Amino acid sequence: MRITPLDIQQKQFRKRFKGYDPEEVHAFLQLVSGEVEEIRKEHAALKEEARAVGNQLNEFNELEVALRDTVIKTQEFVETYRANMARNAELLQRDAELKAEEMLKEVQKKIVKIHEEITGLKGIRKHFKEEMTKLIEGCLGDVEAG
């Protein structure tokens, strides 16, 4: 059974002959009652403080879990980002190589075409030269004959 300060204050003792001085007993009970009241208040305050500290500890634990999760997710994001960047760089490099190969093939086709045109023009020049030579020789032959 818990004794309250009020129980102490209201406690009645039977009176006997040659017993304790009632005023002294009453004064002592008042003192004990006050002390018990202070201890109860202190106990209640400590319980409240312990509850608050427990709540704060729970909040810190939740914050720690959240921070840990955030760090893990951030690391996963960074790893994914790096992998994506490496893949993108590889794709860009492949694309650039393919474009360079296509450009090289185009240039080679143009070179072949230009060579064909040059060969054609050389043939035309040779034919023209031969025709001019014949014409000049024919004219010279006409001039000498005439």
Image (cartoon, helix red, strand yellow):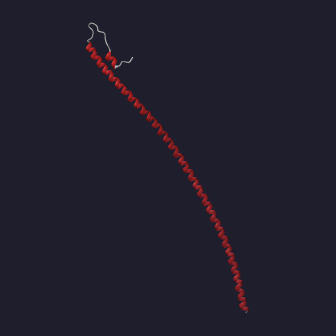
Question: Is 135 drawn above or below residue 1 in the view shown?
Answer: below
Q: Residue 119: where, in percent of width, then height?
A: 68, 73
Left or right, 107 with respect to 46, comes to right
Q: Image quadrant of residue 121?
A: bottom right
Residue at 39 percent across and 27 percent down: it is: 47
Instruction: Look at 60% across and 59% down and name the residue there.
Output: 99
42 or 22, which is in the foreground?
A: 22
- The percent coordinates of residue 27 (x first, y second) are 27, 17
Residue found farthest to the top:
17
- The structure residue drawn at horizontal position 64% and vertical position 68%, both measured from the top left corner, is 111
Residue 135 percent coordinates (x, y): 71, 84
Give above or below for 93 relative to 57.
below
Give the quadrant of residue 55: top left
In-front residue for pair 19/73 = 19
**Where on the picture, by quarter, is residue 34?**
top left
Q: Is residue 43 left or right of residue 62?
A: left
| Quadrant (top left, top right, bottom left, bottom right) of the C terminus | bottom right
Residue 132 place in picture, x, y as percent? 69, 83
Residue found at the far bottom of this picture: 146
Name the quarter where the N terminus is drawn. Answer: top left
- Up/down of 104 relative to 6, above or below: below
Q: Residue at x 49, y 41 (%)?
A: 70
